[in-house]
Image: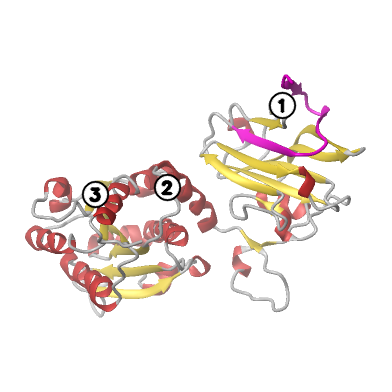
Amino acid sequence: MALQSLALQTGGNAPIAQEGRVEVKMKWLRSLHDVDITCFLVEENGKVPNDDYMVFYNQSADPSRAVQFHQLNDKSVSFQIKLDELPSQIEKCVFTATIDGASTFQDVEGCTLVASSEATEIRYDVTDAKEEKALVVAELYRYNGTFKLRGVGRGFNGGLKPLAEAHGVTVEDEEEAEVEVKQEPPKINLTKIDLLKKQVVISLQKKNIEHEKARVAVVIDASGSMTNLFSKGTVQRAFERALAVAAHMDDDGVLDVWFFGDRSMRAASVTENDFEDYVKRTYPAPKFFRGLGVGNNEPAVIKDIMKKYTKEEPREDMPTYVLFFSDGGIYKDAEISLLLKKASNHNIFWQFIGIGKANYGILQKLDDLPGRVVDNADFFPFDDLDKVSDEDLYNRLFNEYPSWLQEVKRRGMVRS
């Protein structure tokens, strides 16, 4: 039987299937900011039975698993829908799109929904969107014992939070995140870290390591030259981007944290539930006195990291991934080189990120550092980290790590 292809106009509808499976894909060609696609499984009143029936990147299936979300790449997603397994009270699957940042859907090019069953393919091009930040794109709904698809293309004021609330989902405000309400189902919490995690997953998928786990640590330069980056919030934002890596990769979602100047400090480990103002609460600025000092002593913090992961808490089944932020001024080249050579005997990968314009010393020559068991370190600089997109940052972070991981597994340094 030939596949029937149809094109929907806004407001139009067409039958797609009576039973079996339907795949709904959303894709777009270009966008200045992230586009988030969500499916709400709603009852006759237009509301979800409860928050578990909102299917999106942070909740990939409903309780019945009749609808499952898949992130295909950074510009397309799909929903696999088992029509026969949809709960009987669900009348519609409502597909929506929201956009982050200062953009609206006028800035999104080539936005298209394609719904496919065994016999029918229906295409709906979103062409009428203008200044909206949220859209109801289409509906898959029950009609006289069959299922139809309707092209909606209706704008909605606000972003994902008001859109979700309009469909009966209770979304937690960030300032309410620490308030625990007993004997009530947990609310869906859409924080900065949730959005960053989505990009982490996309970057890991490109390297085919999205399911690999690791202990994750971040090291933050707290020398005197970092004062401006602390005061304008760059350090907090860098910390949040590192935390998103741990929230996905770490087996328990915990990020270990170090600060260093002349001395090294192990700070409190943190999860995505406690990221707000972490830097301000923990080490708010470089300190000349009664702090870590304002010099650059990278060897001190490297030694303490190795002490923790190779002596105090060694794990043969789990690699360690260290994100090391520095604004340069590095001069202890010989000692750093020696430590990285020693560290190459262990399952620790060192990812150095430059966030200033100063001298990075030996870090700029890591690819040529001899005498290591494996190439266990990578470095790249950014003059202004705040101007680097999440996509670019995470793609760079996972540039050399996959090949290192493959090599240490081959050598038995990480045992699955």
Indicate the quadrant containing the N terminus: top left, top right, bottom left or bottom right: top right
> Which residue is at a point 68% across and 36% down the rendered structure image?
24
Which of 33/10 is in front?
A: 10
Crowd tier of the residue under label 2, counting other residues whose Cα lies within 10 Å: few below 14, some 14–19, many 20 or above: many
Indicate the quadrant containing the C terminus: top left, top right, bottom left or bottom right: bottom left
Mark 1 — residue?
121
Disc 3 from disc 2: Cα separation: 18 Å
Please tell me whether residue 3 belongs to the stretch shown in magenta.
yes
Quadrant assignment, res 392 = top left
Q: Which mark is residue 237?
A: none
Main SS, magenta residues: strand
Labels 1 and 3: the sequence-earlier one:
1
What is the tally of numbered marks visible in this picture? 3
Which of 315/138 is in front?
A: 315
- Kind of element beneath mark 2: helix
Q: Is residue 144 above or below residue 215?
A: above
> Which residue is at a point 69% across and 28% down the rendered structure image?
126
Which residues, given as a range, are shown in magenta? 1-27
Crowd tier of the residue under label 3, counting other residues whose Cα lies within 10 Å: few below 14, some 14–19, many 20 or above: many
Mark 2 — residue?
204
Asked if one can make out residue 390 in the rendered structure from this viewpoint, the answer is no
- Name the residue type under label 2: Leu
Q: Residue 209: x, y in percent?
A: 40, 49
Disc 1 from disc 2: Cα separation: 31 Å
Mark 3 — residue?
379
Disc 1 from disc 3: Cα separation: 47 Å
